Amino acid sequence: MTKPQFYRDTWVEVQLQDIYENVQSMRQYLDPSVKIIGVVKANAYGHGDVQVAKTALKAGASILAVAFLDEAISLRKSGIEAPILVLGATHSEDANIAIKYNISVTVYEKKWLEEVVGNITDPLSVHIKYDTGMNRLGLKTIDELRTVLDFVKEVSSIKVEGLYTHFSSADEIDTTYTEFQYENFIEAVEYCRNSTNIPIVHCGNSATGLRFPTRLFNAVRLGIAMYGLSPSEEMKEILPFPLKGAFSLHSRLSHVKKIHAGEKVSYGATYTATEDEWIGTVPIGYADGWSRSLSMREVLVDGRRTPIIGRICMDQLMIRLPQKFEVGTKVTLIGKQDDEYISVDEVASALGTINYEITCMISYRVPRVFMDGENMIEVMNPLLHHFD
Ligand SMILES: *Cc1c(COP(=O)(O)O)cnc(C)c1O
């Protein structure tokens, strides 16, 4: 690295080796006939989509999935050549863009297909989404599936590459609803089998892949487990192999001062010192995704838990230090320092949400630093990216 790629003292570290090992563990756990679709939507759950995509492909994934077309185009423009599937809705007017970038899109309405066929000249690859009980996106009945398949047979410009569904509750110990959805999907798969040949059939997210490795048809959509996080708290007890969390969040003290009993800290003056106290200022705030609701929670300094005091500001927060520390001392908000550890799950639980939301919410203002152990491999900093 010849020039610094970020100047602020707050950054995310992503251990690409952990992501590699999580994908490899899944690769070894599953039958070789099951393809791994690496789900890298939302900037790879906040981890950095291009680097994660490359790592996943090296480790045994062969397809990528994102939520919408812009995410797919962004990967293409970064030189990713693997097949990409858009899981969400795509406007029928944008089918030509998907074709131009060789991106597969999801079909869930016949009307959409009719519009697309009117718009395109070159073939478009699609995966048909069948809704087995999530009620988000998908054809809902075998009748609807029949009309779509019949329509597709009559036109040469639509290539049906896949058929899939999504389970709503695969991460819960109780499998009743998943069984119900699975049975519905079997019906759709059987119907298609008698009608046409669809190469890729998939029903599983991470939870399904981990728990029902023999019920995946021939592909699995691997998201959260690739990042080393458990799909749910309940599932932590039954993981078939250890997952390695790849994400950590750090900053450095930018100002350290002593205040006296009675002095107040931050907006609203909600915190009052009860004695002489060492206060550290940390340059991370809610605009970085460190929610105001985390005021009163802890961070790590010098391997110790240290409380956040007063309100979290847009760009900064204050902590009460057990003693004086030098400006520049490392502060860890997610991750390990010596024997102390703040996990993504701990932050999720503090905010009453799931681990998925935590890594996604750390904003574009925080550069992603890709690591191989202690070595920095690459930096992604969208703020400076466009001016290089
Ligand atoms: C996000 C998403 C996934 C990935 O789910 P994980 O629980 O993160 O593995 C799979 N399928 C669809 C349709 C999704 O939207």
Image (cartoon, rainbow, N blue to C red):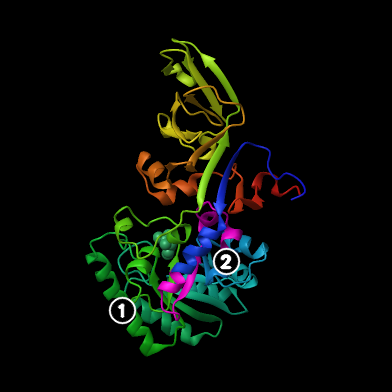
Q: Which residues are magenta?
A: 26-53
Q: Which mark is residue 186?
A: 1
Tag 2: amino acid: Glu
Residue under pointer 2:
93
Look at the image and tell me whether residue 321 can be seen: yes
Position of residue 31 measured from the top left corner of the image (x, y, whole percent)? 41, 79
Position of residue 161 measured from the top left corner of the image (x, y, whole percent)? 49, 79
Secondary structure of the residue carrying numbered label 2: helix
Position of residue 335 measured from the top left corner of the image (x, y, whole percent)? 48, 44
Position of residue 85 measured from the top left corner of the image (x, y, whole percent)? 52, 69
Query: Which numbered disc flags the more N-terminal residue, 2 or 1?
Result: 2
Q: Callout 1: few (<14), some (14-19), or many (20+) C-alpha neighbours within 10 Å? A: some
> What residue appears at the point 50 percent right and 22 percent down from the top-left corner?
323
On whether ligand 1 comes within 8 Å of the CB at mark 1, the answer is no
Q: As drawn, is 232 to the left or to the right of 229?
A: left
Look at the image and tell me whether residue 40 can be seen: no
Q: As drawn, is 191 to the left or to the right of 358?
A: left
Which quadrant of the structure image shows residue 305?
A: top left
Q: Callout 2: few (<14), some (14-19), or many (20+) C-alpha neighbours within 10 Å? A: some
Which quadrant of the structure image shows residue 353?
A: top left
Find the residue positioned furthest to the front.
338
Secondary structure of the residue carrying numbered label 1: helix
Q: On the rendering, which quadrant does ligand 1 occupy? A: bottom left
Is the Cβ of the residue at disc 2 closer than 8 Å to that at disc 1?
no
> What residue appears at the point 31 percent right and 63 percent down from the top-left corner?
170
Give above or below for 353 relative to 42: above
